Amino acid sequence: MESQIPQILKKVKSNRKYSSLVDEIVLDEIRKYLKKNPNETINKSMIKDIRKNLHKLYSTYSSKKNKRNKLLEELKNNPKNLNIIKQVLKTFVSANERIEDYEIIYKNIFNITCKPKSIIDLGCGLNPLSFPFMHLKYLDYYCYDIDEEDIKFLNEYFNIMKSKGLNGKAQILNVQDFEKISKLLPTVDIIFLWKIIDLIDIDNHKTSEELIKILMDKSKFLVASFATKTITRKPMNFPKRKWFELMLNRIGLSFETFSINNEIFYVIKEINNKDAQKIVNDFCNAPKKSKNSSMKKIKRIIMSQYMKMK
C-alpha cells in the first residue's frame, strides 16, 4: 500500500479546498488512515474520509481567500488602517467571530500575564492580524499553521507591519508533531492555543495533555480556548471543559477563565507558592464537608511537584 501513497496524495489534493495544504500534513493523515485500514484499496470512500479528517483540522475554521490579497495591497499604503485589517480578519471564520472582542480578549489576557514581548501562536489562522488590538509597542510573534497560502500571506503582512513594532515570522507546522514542536519552538512569554485542543483530541485527552506539558516548558503562560457554540451556532450544553480543568490541576497547573460571546479562554500557568498558599488557606478555612475536595487539590500539587523533581 505504501507504493500507492503518492496516488492517494494526488487524489486528496485534487480538490481545490485542500490543494494549498502542505504535502507533509496530508501524508500524515493518509498514513494514519492506512494504519487503521491496512487492507483497503484506493476508492472514493477512502479519499472522502481522509479529506474529512483534514477538514476537521483546518477547513472548519477557514473561509474564502479571494479578497485578502487586494486588501493586503491597500494595507501597504496605510498600515495603521484598522478598517482594512478588520476586512481581512472577516475572511477567516474564527478571526471574524472575534473582531468585536479582540480588545477585551487581549486586555483580559495581559491583565493576568502582563504585556508580553514575545508570543507563539499555534494553529494561528489569520489571528496575527489582530496585533493592533494588543496595543503593544513591540512584539516578537512566531506563528504556525498548515496552509502554505496562509503562511505566505502572513509573512507578507509581517513585512508591512515591521515598521509598527511587529517582528513576525510564520512557518508551516503540524500541531500534532510533538517532536518538531519540542525542537523548533523558541522560549516566549505567552503561547496561544486557540480552538485547537478539541481538534487534536480525537480518541482521548492524552494528546492534549502531552502537548500542554511540552508547551509549558517553552513559556510561563499558555492561553487555550474552546468554542462555546457548535458550527451551526447552537450553544453547547457544557461550554466549560471540566475534563480540561481537572487535567490542568492534576499536572500542577493553575488557570483563570473568561468568556466572549462564543469562546471560552483559559489562561494557564504553573502553580506557584502564592497559588499553593491560597489553596492551603482555603482548606484551613473551609467547612468540614468541603475539605475533601481541597485536600485532593493539595495532594495533586504535592504529587506534581514531586514528579518534576524526579
Image (cartoon, helix red, strand yellow):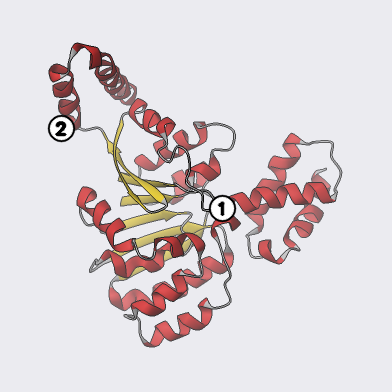
The residue where tag 1 is placed is 232
Residue 146 image position (x, y, % from top left): 56, 57
The residue where tag 2 is placed is 274
Quarter in which the C terminus is drawn: top left
Residue 238 visible in the displayed image: yes
Q: Is residue 215 above or below residue 75?
A: above
Q: Amino acid at mark 2?
A: Lys
Location of residue 243 by image quarter: top left
Which residue is pictured at 52% across the width and 70% down the height? 152
Q: Is residue 58 above or below residue 228?
A: below
Q: Is residue 193 left or right of residue 201?
A: left
Q: Residues within 10 Å of mark 1 (few under 14, many from 20)?
A: few
Residue 230 image position (x, y, % from top left): 52, 48
Which residue is pictured at 73% across the width and 61% down the height? 13
Task: Report the residue that reaches farthest toward the bottom.
Answer: 77
| Label ID, residue 162 | none
Which residue is pictured at 43% across the width and 59% down the height? 143
Q: Which numbered disc, 2 or 1, marks the residue that appears first in the sequence? A: 1
Residue 176 visible in the displayed image: no
Task: Report the residue that reaches farthest toward the top.
Answer: 288
Q: Amino acid at mark 1?
A: Thr
Residue 259 image position (x, y, % from top left): 34, 49
SS at circle 1: loop
SS at circle 2: helix
Q: Is residue 164 above or below residue 230?
A: below
